[in-house]
Image: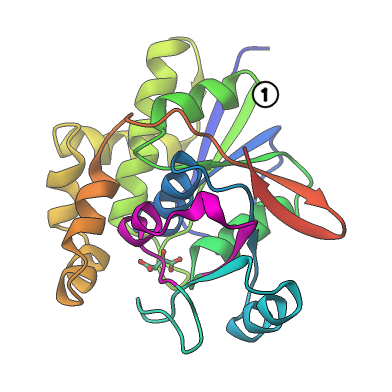
Amino acid sequence: MGARLDVILSPTEALPPCEVWLVVDVLRATTTMTVFFECGGKKMLPVESVEEGLALKKSLGSGWLLMGERKGLPPQGFDLGNSPLEAANACVSRYEGAIMTTTNGTRALLAAASTGAPVLIASARNAFAAVDAALSSGSSIGILCAGRLGRVSLDDSACAGALVDIALEKEPKILFSDGARIAHSVWHSYGKNMEEALKDASHAHFLLGLGFGDDIRLACQLGVSASVPKLAFISGRWTVLL
Ligand code: MLT
């Protein structure tokens, strides 16, 4: 049977069976993760809650960064926010790793992991490398959009559409689900241009209001990174590594 591609536009949809997941939270969690590993970060521990993050940082010590956001900003006691720019400027390679919690992105990652299929981190930055990695990991690929507070988001739908477009170039006979066709149409309706799509995205407006325009610019750069982090279950914990 040929390759199949499904896009789950909202994390509240039931997750279908598939052989490999690409999880997308282009604004900003999976973009931040991509940049963290681009910059030499060693490993990242995604956790659900702020309390879990603080407790883990306490037990792991100062060799670990605690990063993430609630309502777009770093919670009290965190070293960094969920910002690709901050990750790029933080000399992340000097640390043993980072603990990260975000409102939607890290939860989507853990939801995909709970299906038992391999999970890869995707963003616009690593779009080509992420599609290559997914196509070589399985013939049934699911793209899970983290969305926003349980709802579909334009930013993740456009990024998923870009991934669908790349998969189609590489595998012209790939079979699409309706979700994949919708994401693909969104991407084409913005002229295959991430900046244009994000101009209309409510989460981009929210981040601009907080002064994170540079993060949005980093999130829009298509195919500039070859780093495709993946989830692995190590010592009883989900761990993101290269
Ligand atoms: C999230 O996981 O909800 C987002 O990445 C939010 C953000 O932009 O920081």
Residue range corresponding to the magenta coloring:
80-101
> Residue at image x 19%, y 57%?
214
Question: Is the C-beta of the residue carrying label 1 under 8 Å from the nearest atom of ligand 1?
Answer: no
The three-letter code of the residue at mark 1 reads Ser
Nearest the viewer among 34 and 59 is 59
> Where does the image place residue 236, in percent across and percent down from the top left?
87, 60
Q: Quadrant of the N terminus?
A: top right
Residue, far right: 235
> Residue at image x 64%, y 86%?
51
Q: Is residue 16 above or below residue 48?
A: above
Q: Is residue 81 magenta?
A: yes
> Image quadrant of residue 221?
top left
Q: Secondary structure at mark 1?
A: loop
> Residue at image x 37%, y 81%?
71
Q: Quadrant of the C terminus?
A: top right
Left-right relation of 197 to 87: left
Ligand 1 located in image quadrant = bottom left
> Residue at image x 58%, y 27%?
134
Q: Which residue is mark 1?
A: 137
> Where does the image place residue 123, in percent across and percent down from the top left?
41, 42
Q: Residues within 10 Å of mark 1 (few under 14, many from 20)?
A: some
> Where does the image place residue 152, in percent across and percent down from the top left?
39, 60
Residue, far bottom: 76
Nearest the viewer among 122 and 187 is 122
Could you tell me if residue 25 is visible in this image?
no
Q: Is residue 178 above or below residue 24?
A: above
Q: Is residue 185 magenta?
A: no
Could you tell me if residue 241 is visible in this image?
yes
Nearest the viewer among 139 and 182 is 139
> Where does the image place residue 180, in percent across and percent down from the top left?
43, 36
